[in-house]
Image (tube, helix red, strand yellow):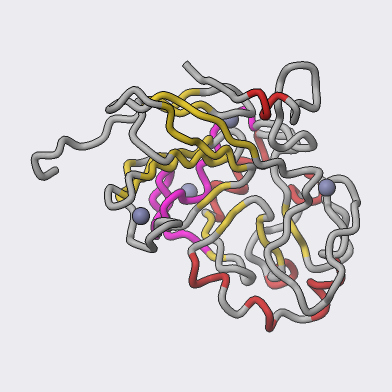
Amino acid sequence: MMKFTDSDKSFDLFSDHFDPTPRLKSSYMPIWFIPFNNENNCSNCNCEYSETTFFKQKYCEYCIKKFYDNNPSKCLDIQISTNIKYENESIKNIEFGTPSLQKWYFKQIIPSTYSLIGYDTFNGEMIECEKNCNLCGKFMIISKYNIKLTLCSSCYLISSGWIESALTKVPIPIFYLPWWDASDQCVACDKVLEFKPECLKWCLHCYIIYTGCRYCLTTNIIFGITNESQCRKCGRIIYIVLPNNDGN
Ligand SMILES: [Zn+2]
Ligand SMILES: [Zn+2]
Ligand SMILES: [Zn+2]
Ligand SMILES: [Zn+2]
């Protein structure tokens, strides 16, 4: 089972439950309209993914519309380049992909590495509205020359802990990230990850496993081999079966 270190407990915001994104809700149903491994086609409807103008984040136009029709909870943090304050209702009524809404992106999705290059060329419009966190309003950016994919440190909480290795039975570190890592490259070695749909990928070069929770858009990164990975927001467990060492 999951083991958290004592230091993790000091992060607890609400009773004994740590919530990595306290101002966002978990979705009632899985968020299928974004890839976990930079794939080209939607795993739900098989349509080719669209891309946001900023960061080239992939998403399915068809499935995101369907999602908003059926899911009223505030589970997404979308950055729009106007001064529209984020509300699910206002997003629901906007046609994704239309010219009027070209300048937006998902705050919660880390895209593939190449998409992050060139963000410095973004115009002042986006920079202006990024000054404050969509969720709590906190002022985030101090220098206009220091623009990155910035997340509010009060609304997106990183934590870590230890779980037991399935191989050696010793504790191995796990990072609980409050965002969705959609990249298909390993964070440590840049090699292309092996992907097992829908929300499991790994680098057998580094022995790093990545799991995603499609209800919360969180990512766990595990530095070793383990059999399961639990979302720290909703508690759902992803079971991990890695290929044998006999080739594949
Ligand atoms: Zn789709
Ligand atoms: Zn915030
Ligand atoms: Zn690696
Ligand atoms: Zn979850």
- Residue for point 61% across, 35% down: 216
Image height check: is 156 above or below 128? above
Image height check: is 233 above or below 56? above
Which is nearer the eye, 102 or 197? 197
Query: Relative to 5, is 42 on the left or the right?
Result: left
Judged from this view, the residue extending furthest toward the left is 246
Dominant SS of magenta comes to loop
Residue 142 colored in magenta in the image: no
Numbered marks: total: 0
Which is nearer the eye, 167 or 69? 167
Quadrant in the picture for residue 51? bottom right
Image height check: is 128 above or below 182? below
Quadrant in the picture for residue 229? top left
- Residue for point 65% across, 34% down: 70
- Measured from the top left, where is residue 163 in percent x and y? 46, 26
- Measured from the top left, where is residue 48 in percent x and y? 42, 60
Residue 39 colored in magenta in the image: yes
- Measured from the top left, where is residue 25 in percent x and y? 72, 32
Quadrant in the picture for residue 191? bottom left
Chain part drawn in magenta: 27-50
- Residue for point 28% across, 30% down: 241
Quadrant of the snapshot with the C terminus:
top left
- Measured from the top left, where is residue 3 in percent x and y? 53, 20
Image height check: is 55 above or below 90? below
Query: Relative to 40, is 160 on the left or the right?
Result: right
- Residue for point 60% across, 53% down: 109
